[in-house]
Image: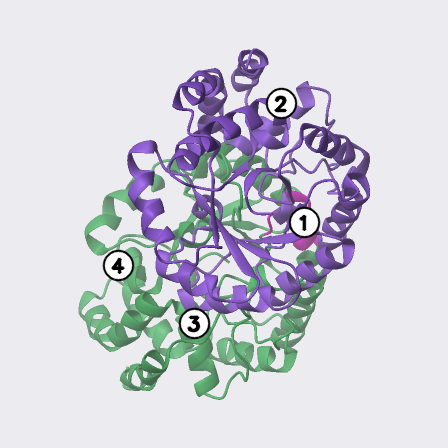
Chain colours: A green, B purple
Amino acid sequence: MFQGLSAFPITPADPDGRVKTDELAGLLERLVVAKVDSIGLLGSTGSYMYLAREERKRAVAAAVAAVKGRTPIIVGAGAMRTDEAVRLAKDAEEAGADGLLLAPVSYTPLRDEEVFRHFAAVAGATGLPLCIYNNPSTTHFTFSDALIARLAAVPGIKAVKNPGLPAAEIGPRHAALRAMVPAEFAIGYSGDWHASACLLAGGVGWYSVIGGLLPEPTLKLARAAAAGDRAEVERIEAAFAPLWDLFKQASSYRIVHAAAKRLGLASGDPPAPLLPPTADEIARIEPALAALRAV
Amino acid sequence: MFQGLSAFPITPADPDGRVKTDELAGLLERLVVAKVDSIGLLGSTGSYMYLAREERKRAVAAAVAAVKGRTPIIVGAGAMRTDEAVRLAKDAEEAGADGLLLAPVSYTPLRDEEVFRHFAAVAGATGLPLCIYNNPSTTHFTFSDALIARLAAVPGIKAVKNPGLPAAEIGPRHAALRAMVPAEFAIGYSGDWHASACLLAGGVGWYSVIGGLLPEPTLKLARAAAAGDRAEVERIEAAFAPLWDLFKQASSYRIVHAAAKRLGLASGDPPAPLLPPTADEIARIEPALAALRAV
């Protein structure tokens, strides 16, 4: 389940934080039809930290009903409190999720032992396999390789979603972690603009923001990188370059929300205080999407 | 209200996140009797991001009932969503709070315009004066002086709680902001180990963690610094030094929770995933407290 392209859709919601399950179902159908390897529901792109427990439950139930077992669904269960993360994980399992994604969301910065116990508690709360969500740009906690290796020995913890690194850096970093975890432990990456480099370096999964909106070109890039076809990767990356620039400038979160709206796939905006991109940034979305139509 | 020593107590709670209002009342009585200038309820030290809305409401109601108007109560209203922060601010006002403290809590990193609108929305939601809570170590958002100045022009926004800086840096930084905001806008500081330097540099408020537990020695330090008595500040700072070392190493949050327990003022631990300090750190708490008894 933690291999290949995991596509992370937005979770459309109204200004009060009520999930628009019909729009969500429409986004998910595109992913199923395109044959992504898994769906990453309620990830950072899916606004999990901005949605109440009941809405997260509604989103999972709606996704399970829409996907009908055709594609595995991995659900984000992150929360500030361990008891709340445990409840969210159980909710996801009851609603029919196939796997869990857990980030060490924090306010008071966390220590390694605190993160370890938090993950062990959530992993032990359900029968679902769990992927460690290492996303320092939002959680402000950075996993050491040693902590990932310690967590990889906990029953149920089967994968890590690490932040991607540039081609010049990822090789030795991937190899170092690979040497510390069991062979069956899946090391994947997020950060769309580094993903192909990470797959070429041996990563087995790409947890993708743009894959949740535009699965076809994203799958082409993922398949080319997994096959080690560097010329094809280079060709497709050139088409993605304007979008990556926007992601870096305005965050992928704001850009995919605005792009989904522009494509008529979702009708709302991100939850306040988050705003749509600036007018200048929005003007650059259509050309960036156009560059991908030829891929 | 945003001048002098603002004392931030912990919010005692059981492992399920239910506030222990009797223990909270006991902590608050110490602050009132010691005559701190204000109480900072549900700040970072008061676990606001780990408590549900209903519990935060209960904590404010219990505090208002215990303090009986003897000391102004400033209440933290921070939340990921603007609508939730607005609800929390209204809850606090209805329960009898005297002021608000608002931090730009984030998951997706926030832009300046997003923070501006978030603060304007919360400031406009109640009749209470509001203090900007600038705490990059927990919120991961850093206010520019220009943004603080822009917010200082919003009706209701009356003060900032800035992170403290060492004596060698605070002078010009304080003066630069002072020159950009109205004379009646209060600039205060947090970060206990830098506070006396910040008061000596012209800061008018100290938002203090240790003041919430040990108001007497903290008030002595605050009064000496406000009076510009550098010799007395130096003498008292020497007594605080072992505690500041512990705060820096284990976070003031973990240390004051453990110290409150040791002093018999609270019976619980921080909410999981947060843990008490390590055994080594706990062993250093009693000597650090002993050093303060002679102040």
Name the residue carrying label 4. A197
Name the residue carrying label 1. A84
Residue depth check, mark 4 versus mark 3: number of the one nearer the observer: 3
Residue depth check, mark 1 versus mark 3: number of the one nearer the observer: 3
Residue depth check, mark 1 versus mark 4: number of the one nearer the observer: 1
Q: CA distance from mark 1 to mark 2?
A: 27 Å
Q: Nearer the viewer, residue B111 or B50?
A: B111
Q: CA distance from mark 4 to mark 3?
A: 24 Å
Q: CA distance from mark 2 to mark 3?
A: 43 Å
Q: Is residue B58 left or right of residue A158?
A: right
| Chain ID, mark 4 | A
Name the residue carrying label 2. B259
Q: Mark 4: which amino acid?
A: Ala
| Depicted B280 relative to depicted B188: above or below | above
How many residues crowd around disc 3 within 10 Å: few (fewer than 14), some, or many (20 or more)?
Answer: many
Q: Mark 2: which amino acid?
A: Ala
How far from the left and from the top, in percent, is residue A201?
Answer: 26, 53
Q: Mark 3: which amino acid?
A: Arg
Q: Is residue A182 left or right of residue B63?
A: left
